[in-house]
Each structure stands twice: as C-alpha cells, then as structure tokens.
Image: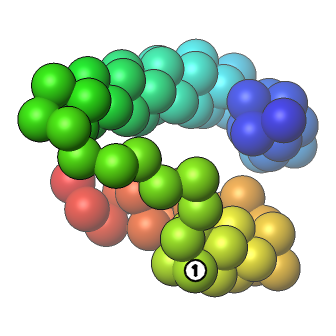
Amino acid sequence: MLLQAAQRFAHGRRSPPLARIAELFIREEQRHAALLRAFMEDHHIALKRTDWTDRVFRLVRRLAGLELYYTYSSALN
C-alpha cells in the first residue's frame, strides 16, 4: 500500500527515481524491524502488537499525505 502510494506520488511529480527510493527505504525499515524482533525474542522481551504512537503516526501520514512523509524523511538525513 505504501509502495503504491509512493509510485503514484513519483508519477505525479514526474520523478521515477522517487518510487525506487521509497522501495529501498521501505525494505530497509522492514529489515530494521526484523532485527529488532529477533533481538527482543532472543532477550525474551514481549512483542507489542500495536502502540498508540504508531496509530497517531499512521493517522497523520494519511491526513497529510505522502508528501509529508517524504519531507520528514528528507529532514532526518
């Protein structure tokens, strides 16, 4: 879903590299999540299914659109 939104965003901005950048970013974030999960399982730390901060972030991202997501990500670098 997020990747499809990135592809639409890139197409709308006539910037095909943005779709590939988003794909790589998503893949890297998923890798981080897998590493964190493995660490937590190895140390017997209970996994959370959800957290209010995740719900708020997703709501803001949906309301503001993908452009905010890219702007925020770019500001971190």
Estimate the x, y position of residue 55 in percent, counting from the top left: 67, 73
Viewer-side residue, 19 vs 48:
48
Estimate the x, y position of residue 32 in percent, counting from the top left: 30, 30
The kind of residue tagged 1 is: Trp
Viewer-side residue, 44 vs 76:
44
Residue that appears at 45% across and 27% down: 30
**Residue 2, placed above or below residue 75:** above
Q: Quickly name the residue at label 1.
A: 52
**Residue 30, placed above or below residue 67:** above
Task: Decide if residue 42 is on the left or right side of residue 32.
Answer: left
Estimate the x, y position of residue 45 in percent, counting from the top left: 23, 46
Viewer-side residue, 4 vs 45:
45
Viewer-side residue, 52 vs 31:
52
- Give the secondary structure at mark 1: helix
Residue that appears at 59% across and 62% down: 50
Task: Decide if residue 72 is on the left or right side of residue 6.
Answer: left
- Asked whether residue 10 appears in the rendered view, the answer is no
- Asked whether residue 37 appears in the rendered view, the answer is yes
